[in-house]
Image (tube, rainbow, N blue to C red):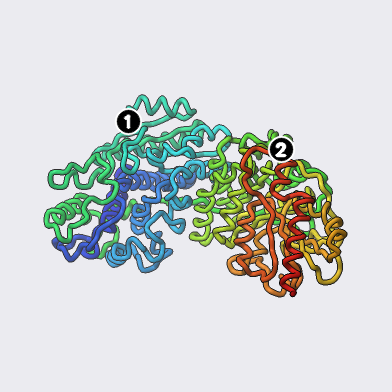
Amino acid sequence: MTEAAVLAGALWRATVYAAVCQLHLRDNVLLTERLMAEHVKEHPSGHWGTVPGTAWVLSHIAIAAGKLRRRVDLVPLLGAGHAGVVQFAASWVSGALEEVRSQFGSDAEGLRRLVQAFPDVGGLGPEVSPALPAGAFLGGRLGGCLPFAQGAALDSSAKVAVPIIGDGECETPTTAASWLGHRAVPGSSVLPVVQVNGFCMGNGSLLGAMDDDALRAYFRGLGWGALVIHVVAGSTQEHRAFHTALRKAVEEVLAARPTVLVLRCVKGWGGPKSLGDRVLLGTPDLHKTPLTSPRTDPDQLTQLAQWLASYGPADLFGPDGSARDELAEAVATAHWCSFTPVKRVVVDEGARTAHRHVSTFSEAVTDVATSHARRGDFRIFSPDELASNRLPHLRDEPWTHELLAEEVLLEWLAGWTACGRRGGVISYEAFAPLLIAGLVSHIKQRRMAGANGLPSLNFLLTSYGWHNVHSHGDPSLTTTLLGLGLPSVRVLTPADPARTAAALDEAFDSLDRVNLVVAGKHTRAAHPASTVEEEHERGLAIWPHLSDEGEPDLTIVTAGDIPATVAADAVGHLREQHGCRIRVVNLLDLTVLGSAPPWPRGLGTAETDHYLGTRAAVLVLTLGHPSAVWGLLAGRLHRPVDVIGWQDPPEPLPQRQLAAALGMDRAGLERAAGQLLLASREVVR
């Protein structure tokens, strides 16, 4: 049996070779003849700098996982989207690529098709793909891989997540906070591998400027032991040293001693050292391939031929391109592990307590969360705000985790739910916009992976600006997601604590969605429950206790607890003042105001007339930005319409003055209703 380090070396050489082929070649992929200009792409392009180090780590993880497969799974994750070329290369060598794209078989013809297809690769694109091994985290948006791995590995005793991240990535706030954040998620078996090659994209990295002692001290101060391994030439001795360190680090992690493995190497090592008089090795010029004109430049063509030959393709592949000798043994030994969603706990819908008898926000959230936590596959992630959000009873539960870094919380939730478990993030609404980039990325990832059946990403947004200080008013997360027109998004605006409980109860068990539940922590209103079922089934309902029978002159649509309370207070006075028929419609899901598609629950013409009336003027009251509602309506209501909602005030205002300034009080409704009714009469004339 061949030594593990030797097998990893063969796998590494094959992976890097296939990656260089993708970047440059269109034919003669095994170098069975002299490399000619016609074998080379007209415009070679792609990222090279991360390839040798990332391929090195992946190869060693796969071999180690094969040796440990009866004991523990080592699950690699790629933090950099630029590592896609490495992932495709490794997947071609292992045969995993052929499983998802049959045209790319593990032979010479499959490699030829792969290099000609790159960077499209059969619709997979050039970046890290969730359809292939090591692709559980999409990458491209730096910073989230480490906390995503922490969330995925939480309570997964049989798996060790191995996120492969760069020294540049370690400068992002999300990664930086995650080194400390591991203390808030005990029971998460994660072995980060940091590739320190000295550069981010174009500038030197901060970690790269540290010597080994400084690196160890840095990680030790954050609570991690650090093993530092230098790789210069890819020798067998270097493979042996790294593999030994990897196995030692795995044992440390399994013993609950946080450990990071640091690979020190030169960016783009193994590639061209210079080009003419220009030095390449150890410079940012190796971020992408430096050989951009080998088809027309004989010197570059010669360098490319020497570069490819340095990996010994004839020793790796047989005449047909199949793996031979040590590479064949390495492919057979390697084990590519992944996170498999756990079996869901099925709940009898008849046992669901959808309409809970609760009177406060605190009771609603605590009751629902505690009920779901009893099933054992549930987590709440929150900044240091649970007590502030009137949820003190959740703080000390073993299934809640607090860290003052919203971006990290999102990744914990995303990793946790990617493994089939359920949960949510609870945050101040004003700080939720920090999640926008990461959340959009995870929506893309789930769509690309065809990840049907995964638990939803749930967010409870509270402490909104209507009842907060000037700096704490910003509903931009809701506005942004609605503006993107993402069919998986639901924006739920329950009118009272009982409806908040029902909304959360359903959201926590839902699949394949992003649920934003916007609810105030101060609300104590209690509206009749007779329409709750319809609100959840269809997203809205007419409130008969506030509505006149027959066709209305004015329809008031409420989205949220404050709008519902204000409308309930004002409707009688409006009816008396204007002598008109009024209908009040409570909106649970804002997306029903949009058209279908893209919104699955969007109202059709007949339903719009049923709920809003055929010709009634419409006044929408929303907790969020009016622009979000206008965007959903998109001019489809050919009648007088107005929207009252959040606008950032020019200066700090007390709550009542704020509501008055924005029109969210009885006087504001009277003004808006009067103008709409007048406009409606003008239309009739």
Q: Position of residue 206 (x, y in %)?
A: 36, 33
Q: Earlier in the sequence, mark 2 or mark 1?
A: 1
Q: Is residue 289 left or right of residue 408?
A: left
Q: At numbered mark 2, what does the secondary structure look like: helix, strand or loop? A: loop
Q: Residues within 10 Å of mark 2 (few under 14, many from 20)?
A: few
- Observer-nearest of 94 and 116: 116
| Label at residue 538 | none
Q: Amino acid at mark 1?
A: Ala
Q: At numbered mark 1, what does the secondary structure look like: helix, strand or loop? A: helix
- Observer-nearest of 133 and 209: 209
| Label at residue 209 | 1
Tell me if residue 426 comes above or below residue 122 in the rendering: above
- Observer-nearest of 229 and 283: 283
- Give the number of marks: 2
Kindly check if marks 2 and 1 are in contact, taking CB atoms under 8 A apart as contact. Answer: no
Seen at 76% across and 49% down, the residue is 665
- Observer-nearest of 355 and 11: 355
Q: Amino acid at mark 2?
A: Pro
Please identify the quadrant where the C terminus is shown.
Answer: bottom right
Seen at 55% across and 46% down, the residue is 435
Q: Which residue is mark 2?
A: 654
Residue 358 showing in the rendered view: yes
Q: Is residue 571 left or right of residue 10?
A: right
Seen at 15% across and 56% down, the residue is 301
Seen at 63% across and 64% down, the residue is 633
Residue 3 showing in the rendered view: no
Q: Position of residue 444 (x, y in %)?
A: 50, 57
Q: Nearer the viewer, mark 2 or mark 1?
A: 2
